[in-house]
Image: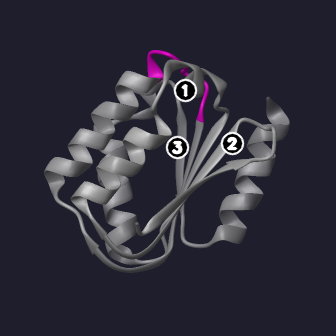
């Protein structure tokens, strides 16, 4: 399994770290796991998806649409989630932007942002959490 989902402290955060080859099936599976129950979704304050250690990303437009729809559905249970993507490569960053187009902040109520480095993502996330 080329991903790991970790609960982050007791802050209501969850991080999915991807590594190696990531396929459509794995991306969908990780989203289903992260959004497995109403209780989980309601408990979240933020998501981090880290693609730093990905060596091969084989993701279709159909899958991006599918996980975007999963986010839209989850937002009906919790519209106050910060979503952070750590997307160091152009392909990853572009797919992240595509996801944002399908699951816009206006539609979800979420605040989403993509970053090239974990340092930049962490700095932004800490600033946003301090405002809540």
Circle 1: element type: helix
Query: Tag 2 or tag 3, which sits nearer the N-term?
Result: 2
* Image depth: mark 1 or mark 3 in front: 1
Q: Position of residue 17 (x, y in %)?
A: 54, 64
How was this image coloured? one colour
* Image depth: mark 3 or mark 2 in front: 2
Question: Image quadrant for the C terminus?
Answer: top right
Query: Tag 3 or tag 1, which sits nearer the N-term?
Result: 1
Q: Residue furthest right?
A: 130
**Residues rendered magenta in the picture:** 75-81
Q: Position of residue 82 (x, y in %)?
A: 61, 39
**C-alpha separation, residue under disc 1 versus residue under disc 3:** 16 Å
Which residue bears the numbered disc 1? 41
Q: How many marks?
A: 3
Most foreground residue, 3 or 109: 3
Q: Position of residue 53 (x, y in %)?
A: 50, 79
Marks 3 and 2 close (CB-CB < 8 Å): no
Q: Residue furthest front?
A: 1
Task: Residue 112: give its label.
Answer: 3
Q: Is residue 121 a member of the stretch shown in magenta?
A: no
Identify which residue is drawn at 53% across, 31% down: 110
């Amino acid at each position: 399994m080329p991903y790991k989902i970790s609960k982050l402290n007791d802050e209501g955060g969850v991080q999915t770290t991807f590594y190696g080859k990531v396929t459509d099936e794995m991306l969908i599976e990780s989203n289903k796991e992260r959004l497995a129950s109403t209780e989980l979704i309601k408990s979240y304050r933020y998501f981090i998806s880290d693609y730093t250690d990905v060596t091969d990303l084989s993701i279709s437009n159909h899958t991006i649409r599918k996980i975007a729809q999963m986010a839209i559905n989850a937002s009906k249970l919790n519209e106050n989630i910060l979503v952070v993507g750590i997307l160091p490569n152009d392909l990853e960053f572009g797919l992240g932007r595509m996801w944002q187009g399908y699951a816009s902040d206006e539609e979800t109520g979420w605040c989403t942002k993509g970053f090239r480095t974990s340092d930049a993502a962490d700095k932004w996330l800490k600033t946003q959490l301090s405002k809540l």
